[in-house]
Image: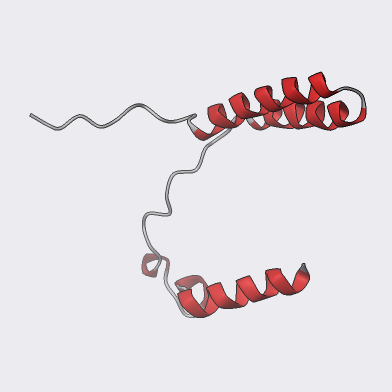
Amino acid sequence: MAALTSFYILFAYRRVGNGPEDIETAEISDADADYGFYSPGSWWPLPVAFSAAVVALGMIYAVWLVLLGVVALLISLGGWTLEYYRGPRLPEA
């Protein structure tokens, strides 16, 4: 597994190359201004973790608990994925 991870990191580094943060003499203005959108805080990891725990407990105790956990896991993963989705953009008039 370590070899797989090392191969991926090496391959990605060769493809992307050095960024401004790797150069000692770089200025702040050399970096890309847009890093993307990052969530300031989300409650969705909590239901995802709880649902995964229910699935794990269901594997030990009962099949119906696994099914309940998988449904809850899919709903919570969907909520986490679509947390900031606001619908399709409408064309400007």
Q: Is residue 67 visible?
A: yes
Q: 40 or 27, which is in the foreground?
A: 40
Residue most extreme to the front: 63
On the image, the x and y values in percent for residue 27 come to 42, 71
- Does residue 83 appear to the left or right of 50 in the view shown? left
The residue at 74%/23% (across/down) is 67
- Image quadrant in which you'd find residue 62: top right
Query: Which colour scheme appears in the figure?
Result: secondary structure
Question: Residue 76, located in which quarter of the rendered image?
Answer: top right
Identify the residue at the far left of this view: 93
Asked if 15 appears above or below 59 in the picture, the reply is below
How many dots with numbers?
A: 0
Q: Residue at x 40, y 66 (%)?
A: 31
Q: In which quadrant is the C terminus drawn?
A: top left
- Relative vertical location of residue 20 with respect to residue 83 in this rendering, above or below: below
Q: Quadrant of residue 64?
A: top right
Residue 40 versus residue 19 in the image, above or below: above
Determine the residue positioned at 52% across, 38% down: 39
- Along the line of sight, which residue is nearer the eye, 27 or 1? 1
Q: Report x, y in % for residue 37.
A: 44, 44
Q: Nearer the viewer, residue 67 or 80?
A: 67
Does the rendering let one see residue 18? no
The N terminus - image quarter: bottom right
Residue 55 lies, in percent from the top left, at: 79, 29
Q: Is residue 4 above or below residue 14?
A: above
Instruction: Tell me where residue 14 appears, x and y as whole percent.
Output: 52, 80
Residue at the spot 60% in from the left edge and 24% down from the top edge: 75
